[in-house]
Amino acid sequence: MKYITTVGKAQFTIDINHEGQVTIDGTEIDANMQQTLDSTVYSVIIDGKSHDLRMNQGDGAYVVQLSGEIFEVVVEDERTRRLAGLRSGATVTKGEAIIKAPMPGVVIEVSVKPDQEVAAGDVVAVLESMKMQNEFKAPRAGIVRAVRVAPGDKINQGAVMVIIA
C-alpha cells in the first residue's frame, strides 16, 4: 500500500508491498520496525542502522521523537488522500460540476433532487465502499441538473452520481 507522508515541508511517497518491502520515493530500502513493550517506543532498523523512536498520535498527525528532535508527521494512505480530494472537490467556478464515484460501491443516500439549489459543501450523496461510508459534497453553489443514482444502486468507479450547474 502507498502512503503519502509529510514531515514539515517535505513530502515522501512510501510504498509497502505484500512482502513487506519498503520503497521511499522509488528507492527500495531495507527497513524493519518493531514495537517495544512501551507502546509508544519503536526500534527501527534502516539499512542496517538501528534507531529508537517515540511516536504518539496527535491531532491529525503523529508526533515523532528521533535522536532528540521532534517531528510532526502526517500520514495518508493513497485511497484516503484521493477521497479527500474528491470530497472537497476541485473548485469549479464555471460550467458543470460533475460528481463521480472514485471507486465502486453502493449508494447509501442521495440528498438532492433535480432543480434543487445547493450551497458549496452541501452533502449530495453518500457512497459505501469497503465498509466505509463516504460523503460527497457540492464543490460550489448551484442548481442540481441531474441525479444519476438512487439509494441501493451498485455503481462502478467513475460513475456519474450528480451534476451541478
Image (tube, helix red, strand yellow):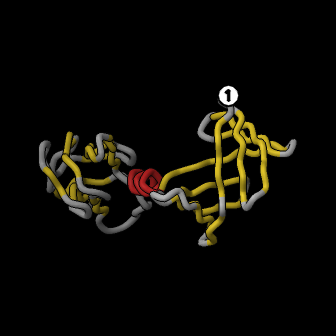
Residue at image position (22%, 50%) is 105
| Residue 2 seen | no
- Residue at label 1? 37
Mark 1 residue type: Leu
Q: Nearer the viewer, residue 13 or 137?
A: 13
Q: Quadrant of residue 157?
A: bottom left
Q: Is residue 88 left or right of residue 116?
A: right
From the viewer's perspective, is 97 left or right of 60?
left
Q: Which quarter of the rendering shows the C terminus?
A: bottom left
Look at the picture and state if 159 lies above or below 117.
below
The image quadrant that residue 91 belongs to is: bottom left
Camera-nearest residue between 142 and 79: 79
Query: Which residue is depicted at the point 31% across and 62% down?
Result: 97
Circle 1 packing at 10 Å, graded few (<14), some (14-19), many (20+), is: few
Callout count: 1
Q: Residue furthest right?
A: 68
Residue 57 falls in image quadrant: top right
- Residue 8: % across, % down: 73, 53
